[in-house]
């Protein structure tokens, strides 16, 4: 069965898209730790990030770096943190989270955004790339 993220890639499930290439997609996390929390995924569905082949893993890191730089330019923060978990969605993904305090890195702290806020921040990060 396709992962939730494969359904996002195919357009079956909507997302707030930040950036897309032939092999990767960046979109906002629907339940963000902080405004601008972005997920970067390979379009190839592989569960665990360290099971990606080396070339795809390195390209995912390069793609994530570009998104992180755009995110840091767009969302006021001390720095952008990068986390890999994968306990909820079995499709490799990198979390990019604008950090101001250690709490922002804790996955039990969540913020609520309106549809407009999601749309505006996704567009602004994409434009900064
Ligand atoms: P993890 O697998 O790294 O533990 O967490 C998966 C992340 O994906 C969570 O932060 C969760 O909020 C996010 N997520 C789960 N389902 C969806 C979805 O349908 N759309 C989006 N945009 N994010 C999702």
Image: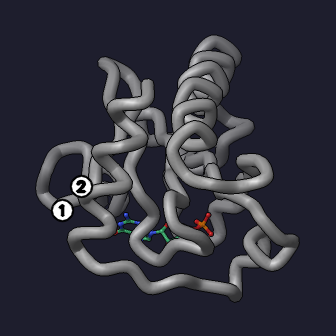
Residue at image x 35%, y 43%?
124
Which residue is denoted by mark 1 in the rendering? 13
Marks 1 and 2 sit apart, C-alpha to C-alpha, by 5 Å
Q: Which mark is residue 4?
A: none
Which residue is denoted by mark 2 in the rendering? 7
Residue at image x 70%, y 55%?
77
Residue 32 is situated, as x and y percent measured from the top left of the image, at 52, 72
- CB within 8 Å, label 1 to label 2: yes
Residue at image x 22%, y 69%?
116
Left or right: 7 in relation to 34:
left
Circle 1: element type: loop
Residue 42 is situated, as x and y percent measured from the top left of the image, at 46, 34
Residue 128 sits above or below residue 54 on the image: below
Residue at the top extreme, as displayed: 55
Badge 1 crowding class, 10 Å Cα cut-off, few under 14, some 14 to 19, many 20 or more, is few
Residue 111 sits above or below residue 94 on the image: below
Most foreground residue, 41 or 97: 97
Residue at the front extreme, as displayed: 76
Q: Does the residue labelled 2 lie within 8 Å of ligand 1?
A: yes
Residue at the left extreme, as displayed: 12
- Tell me the quarter of the picture where residue 15 sits: bottom left
Residue 45 is situated, as x and y percent measured from the top left of the image, at 43, 41
What is the quadrant of the N terminus in the image? Answer: bottom left
Q: Is mark 1 within 8 Å of ligand 1?
A: yes
Disc with the residue nearer the chain's start (1 vs 2) = 2
Residue 110 is situated, as x and y percent measured from the top left of the image, at 59, 84
Left or right: 109 in relation to 79:
left
Circle 2: element type: helix
């Amino acid at each position: 069965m396709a992962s939730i993220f494969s359904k996002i890639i195919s357009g079956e499930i909507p997302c707030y898209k930040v950036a897309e290439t032939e092999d990767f997609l960046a979109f906002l996390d629907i339940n963000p730790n902080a405004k601008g929390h972005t997920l970067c995924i390979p379009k190839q569905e592989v569960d665990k990030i360290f099971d990606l082949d080396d070339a795809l893993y390195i390209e995912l890191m390069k793609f994530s770096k570009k998104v992180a730089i755009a995110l840091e330019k767009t969302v006021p923060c001390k720095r952008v943190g990068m986390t890999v978990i994968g306990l909820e969605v079995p499709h490799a993904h990198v979390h990019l989270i604008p950090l101001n305090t250690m709490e922002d890195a804790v996955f039990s702290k969540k913020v609520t955004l309106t549809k407009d806020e999601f749309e505006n921040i996704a567009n602004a990060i994409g434009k900064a790339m």
